[in-house]
Structure formats: C-alpha cells, structure tokens
Amino acid sequence: MEPTAEPALPGPATPPERRPGAEAGQDAQAASPSPENAPAAALDDLGFQEAFRNDENLQAAFLNAGELTVRGRIEEASNAVLFCTVTHEGRTADAVYKPVAGERPLWDFPDGNLAQREVAAYEISRATGWGLIPATVLREGPYGPGMVQRWVEVPGADGEEIPPLLALVEGDEPGPGWKAVGFAETGQGRPALLVHADDARLRRLAVLDAVINNGDRKGGHLLPGPGGRLFAIDHGVTFHTDDKLRTLLWGWAGEPLPDEAVAVLERLRTELAENRPLAARLAELLTAAETTALRARVDALLASGRHPEPGGDWPPIPWPPV
C-alpha cells in the first residue's frame, strides 16, 4: 500500500489547556449543518452547558453536527493533530481533529487507520459505562475524513492541586498508595522505581487497555478532568490481533480483577455478540479478525479472573514512557 501524502496542514496552534469539551457557549456566528442526529437546541444556555458536560450522547451529536474550523496544529504529535472549534446553532466547543490523510503508515498495523481505531476504542469505553475516553466521532473535516474528539480541560490553572498519578521513587518498594511498574534509569547514574497510583480510575483503565489491546499507554495520555474525572487519549495503536499490550499500568498484573470489572466484562461480552448494536458498529471500524480477537480477549480476562501479566514477545512498557 502506498502511503498517503500528508496534506498542507496549518501552522502550530496555541490552544487552551486540553479540556473535556469547552463549555459550548454562544459566541460563535458561523452557520452549521443540521443532520438528523444534531443536538437539541431547546435547552437554555446554562442548561445546555450542564447537559454537555455530562451527556456523552449529546457531546458526540454536537461533534458530528457542528461546523469544524481548524485553528492550528499541535506540533508535538507524531501524526497530524489539529486544534479546532466546533460550531452548531450559535454554540461552540473545542475539539481535536486527526485527519486520516495526516497519519503515518505503521508496518505492524496494515489494516484500517488510526482514526477508526480511536473511534472503536471510544465505543468500547462507552459500553463499559466508565467514561474514560472523551466523546470521539468519525466524520468529514477540512482535510478529509478523520476522528474528532472533544478537548479535555486539565484542572489546576486556578491553583487546584492535582494528585500525581505517576512518580519515580528511590528504593525497592513503592510505598503506601502506589503500585510498582519497574525500574527506570534517571540519567543520574542510579535507577529509580517507576510507580503509579493505586487508583480505582487507573485500574479501570488498565482493564480497558487489556480489552482493546493498547500498544501505547503512556503517562502523557492520562488527563485528570474536573470533578475527579480521569480521561485517556490517543488510542490509534489498538485492537491488533496479536498481543501488543504496552502500558505503564502494570501495577495490578496477576491480581484478581475487581468485582466491578468482572461485571463490566460480562456485560461487554454480551454486547459484543453478533447482531448486537455494538458489534455492528465495530464492524464498520475494525476488521473481522480484529473483532474476533477482541471477543477472545474479553473471554480470556473473564476465564482468568485476573489482570494480565506482561508477555515475553513484546516490550511491556512504551517508549518514551510519558
């Protein structure tokens, strides 16, 4: 397959801190399309903002319905990542747009594209009910089809303290409230222990990553949100048929799955059955082999009842780790 030439993309953006859907305000003037799934406009502005914060269906509908305006490019990304505003019926929200045309080919992911896998990961996240991945849709944009995801606001600009999720510590033990990942070189001539928080949100994410076979769970993909929420981004390297799980969240490896996770996996197994809406949606985004492997991973997690452990054929921790 010949690689697709990257389009002439805009220069760097200076977006606000990444955020979970800027409140959809009324400062936009541009007209926008109104497909059947357009969000209802009957709510007053305050009511709409509250609904937009809490309703994933409304967020996805807004991202699908609105006019997408590119504001600039986020330079540190390895593929084309564009900061945008989405406008619909006089309201706007911030978003990320990743056009398929801006993706770099991956030798070990020859099928599909990053955008489709990002949307598939969101569909699985939504099915779990955990709300770990921001609303993500597949749609046309100024540079062709791509994924559009609501922007995630990281709190703390007003002085609010955000407890750390990852750390490097001295010694061989992680200490209370932490789980060990492994030793890392610090560049100071001595190793340090890489640890992550023993946090229920992270544990849910570890289960989700095992389900979608995430090959790139880095620390920089973890975004604390308002109200104690945790969001995870960048899920293009997922759903491979081979075991490619690479993550910083190995602290629970081999431990029994929480009862909550088992219940979610059982529900997910039902939703992945043939002729169910989730299975039909994934058939539009993944290959048949990828969907079969997805079902097998859910079955394997339920059969073992434990968090997976690193395999020997694939580096278990992504590089760079953040």
Image (spheres, rainbow, N blue to C red):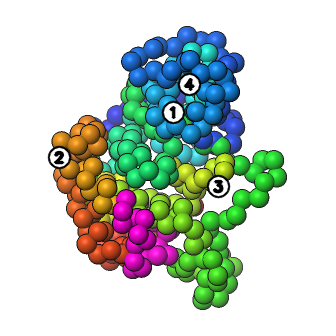
The residue that mark 4 highlights is: 86
Q: State the residue lying farthest toward the bottom.
A: 172
Q: Marks 1 and 2: in contact by CB < 8 Å?
A: no
The quarter in which the C terminus is drawn is bottom right
Q: Tell which circle, 4 or 3, labels the residue nearer the N-terminal end.
A: 4
The residue that mark 2 highlights is: 274
Residue extent of the magenta highlight: 245-264
Measured in 3D between alpha carbons, the distance from the residue under mark 3 to the one under mark 2, in whole angstroms, is 36 Å
Q: Tell which circle, 3 or 2, labels the residue nearer the N-terminal end.
A: 3
Q: Residue 59, labelled with which disc? A: 1
The residue that mark 3 highlights is: 228
Please, what is the three-letter code of the amino acid marked with disc 1? Gln
Q: Secondary structure at mark 2?
A: loop
**Figure quadrant of residue 116:** top left
Q: Secondary structure at mark 4?
A: strand
Q: Identify the residue at image location x=63%, y=41%.
A: 19
Q: Residues within 10 Å of mark 3 (few under 14, many from 20)?
A: few
Is residue 104 or residue 315 the one in the foreground?
315
Q: Is residue 254 above or below residue 292?
A: below
Is residue 82 or residue 163 the one in the foreground?
163
Does the stretch in magenta take in 212?
no
Q: Marks 3 and 1: in contact by CB < 8 Å?
A: no
Q: Nearer the viewer, mark 4 or mark 3?
A: 3
